[in-house]
Amino acid sequence: MLRLLNRINPLACILAGIMALCLASLSHAASPILSRVVDSGVLRVAMSADQPPFTMRSRDKSIIGFDVDLAKYLANAMRVQLEIVEKPFGDLLETLAAGEADLVISGMTITPTRTQQVDFIGPYTLSGKSILTTARIKGVVEDTAVFDHPEIQVAALENSTSQSFVERELSRASLHLISNYDQGIQMLLTGRIDAVVADIPILKLSMLRYPEAGLSMIEPALSIEPIGIAIPGEDAQFANLVGNYMDAIEKTGFIKQLHEKWFEDNNWIMFLP
């Protein structure tokens, strides 16, 4: 019996070793995004650069904003370097699906349709839709239904919830899809369109930047928009890690600090072009 055990034990040890290696390999394979982030020491975050105050380009050409600070804090908490992958808003989810980024932080609303494509962590803040128009039109508006008319020209960001809002609530209006908000605001200022539909913080910033243009915003908010972090759906370990870090970031009061910096204090406007 002793000789039999001596013969079996080495084999059992080898099998156990092989099993351990297989399990380690499976664990590594089960978390491809987390493994890539750990191995490379880099967290790739996709965002646009034209969703103020979430993301925007400063006078020195760098990208600043609420979401930039959040991404930096998240990467720092993970003890990895941050790499910003800049893309138009409408291309962000495609960028994530192509494996060109590890997550998206870019003022992205959590919706059922998007959740069919990706997972979301959050929401980490709330926003809402409104309509930015000129004082001339605002003066005769008693109900937002006035914008639902074939002669009304409305701009909205392509592949955004603003586009969905216009198609759903202002379906009779003439919709102009824009690739960035600066384009839409310039169209409004030059009279090519009658209104821009976007998140309230973006519209408020436009009113601050062009105080003499007579811009007006329809209030109160027309919708509630929960903003979250989009991540690929195939990596539960990575999702768990990001979720845990976001819980910790919330508890430290950092999200509150970001709200005060980017939504309540307008001093950062001086850094814009």
Image: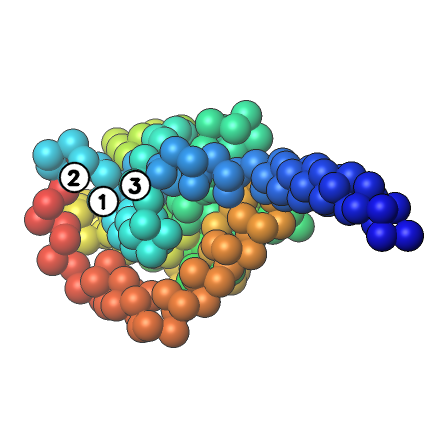
* Image quadrant in which you'd find residue 41: top left
**Label 1 residue SS:** strand
Q: Which mark is residue 64?
A: 1
Q: Which numbered disc flags the more N-terminal residue, 1 or 3? A: 1
Q: Which numbered disc flags the more N-terminal residue, 2 or 3? A: 2
Amino acid beneath label 2? Ser
The alpha-carbon separation of the residues under discs 1 and 3 comes to 17 Å
* Image quadrant in which you'd find residue 170: top right
Dot 3 corresponds to which residue? Answer: 81
Using a 10 Å C-alpha cutoff, classify the residue at mark 2 as few (fewer than 14 neighbours), some (14 to 19) or many (20 or more): some
Dot 2 corresponds to which residue? Answer: 58
Position in image of residue 237 (x %, y %)? 58, 50
Q: Is residue 119 above or below residue 177?
A: below
The alpha-carbon separation of the residues under discs 2 and 1 comes to 6 Å
Q: Which numbered disc flags the more N-terminal residue, 2 or 1? A: 2
Say which of marks 2 and 3 sits in front.
Answer: 3
Amino acid beneath label 1? Ile
Q: Are marks 2 and 1 in contact (CB under 8 Å)?
A: yes
* Residue 51 seen in this snapshot: yes
